[in-house]
Image (cartoon, rainbow, N blue to C red):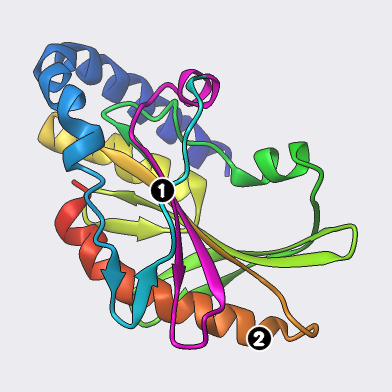
C-alpha cells in the first residue's frame, strides 16, 4: 500500500509539472468549456429535461475553480425526477473532490456507501442519504479521457498516467440522484442505473 501511494505521489507530481507546461495550451479551450464541453442534450433516451438548468452561483464556481458546471433535472416515463450534476475540471483536478464532503455539509447523513456496476461499462459509488424524513439515492463517478470509475484515487491514477503519456488530461465528476419513495431503494437505483447507462455514450462523445 505504501509503495502504491509513493508511486501515485511521484506520478502526480510529475504530471502536475507537465500540466504547468501545457497551461497556456489549455487556456483557450477552457474559455470555451461552458458552452461546448457540457452540451448535454435535453433528451436522453426516454428521459427529458424538466425545467431550466440550475443557476450556479459565483461562490460555487470560485470554490470549485471552474465555470463548467451543469445542474439539470430530467424525468422519464414514470415522471420521477432525476437530478444530473456534472463538474468539469478541465486540465486540473482541483475542482474534483469527494461529493460526500458536500452532502454532509448540506445536512445529509450518509446511511450507506458502497459501489455498484453501471451496465457492463464501469462501477459507480452508491450513496443513500437521509435528511429529516427524506431519503435520496445517489450515484457518482469520474471521467478522465475514456476511463470511467467511481473511485477517486483510481481516477487520480488515470489522470496522472494520461498527463505523463499524452501531455494533457481532463477530468469530470458526474452525479445523478433521485428521491427514494416508499423505502424502495432498489427501484431508485435501478432508475439511476438506467439513466446513467443511457448518459454514458453521450459523455464519452461530448465531455472530452
The residue that appears at 36% across and 72% down in the rendered structure is 48
Residue 113 visible: yes
Q: Against 82, is 154 above or below?
A: above
Q: Is residue 65 magenta?
A: yes
Task: Say which residue label 1 marks.
Answer: 53
Q: Which residues are magenta?
A: 59-85
Tell me what residue is drawn at x 42 percent, y 34 percent: 8
Q: Quadrant of the N terminus?
A: top right
Query: Which residue does the image show at 40% across and 71% down from the upper left?
Result: 196
> Furthest-right residue in view?
132
Give the number of the disc on residue 186: 2
Image vertical order of residue 68 relative to residue 103, above or below: above
Indicate the position of residue 98 as horizontal and vertical percent values.
59, 42
Direction from residue 144 to residue 149 in the image, left or right:
right
Name the element at disc 2: helix
| Relative image position of residue 69 (x, y in whole percent) | 39, 38
Amino acid at each position: 500500500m505504501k509503495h502504491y501511494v509513493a508511486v501515485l505521489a511521484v506520478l502526480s507530481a510529475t504530471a502536475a509539472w507537465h500540466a504547468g507546461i501545457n497551461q497556456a495550451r489549455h487556456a483557450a479551450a477552457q474559455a470555451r468549456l461552458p458552452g461546448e464541453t457540457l452540451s448535454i442534450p435535453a433528451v436522453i433516451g426516454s428521459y427529458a429535461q424538466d425545467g431550466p438548468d440550475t443557476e450556479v452561483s459565483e461562490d460555487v464556481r470560485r470554490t470549485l475553480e471552474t465555470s463548467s458546471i451543469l445542474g439539470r433535472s430530467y424525468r422519464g416515463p414514470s415522471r420521477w425526477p432525476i437530478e444530473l450534476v456534472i463538474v468539469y475540471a478541465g486540465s486540473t483536478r482541483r475542482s474534483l473532490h469527494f461529493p460526500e464532503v458536500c452532502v454532509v455539509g448540506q445536512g445529509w447523513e450518509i446511511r450507506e456507501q458502497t459501489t455498484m456496476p453501471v451496465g457492463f461499462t464501469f462501477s459507480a459509488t452508491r450513496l443513500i442519504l437521509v435528511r429529516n424524513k427524506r431519503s435520496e439515492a445517489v450515484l457518482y463517478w469520474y471521467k478522465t479521457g475514456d476511463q470511467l470509475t467511481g473511485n477517486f484515487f483510481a481516477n487520480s491514477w488515470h489522470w496522472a498516467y494520461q498527463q505523463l503519456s499524452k501531455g494533457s488530461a481532463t477530468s469530470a465528476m458526474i452525479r445523478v440522484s433521485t428521491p427514494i419513495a416508499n423505502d424502495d431503494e432498489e427501484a431508485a437505483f435501478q432508475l439511476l442505473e438506467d439513466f446513467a447507462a443511457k448518459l454514458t455514450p453521450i459523455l464519452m462523445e461530448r465531455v472530452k
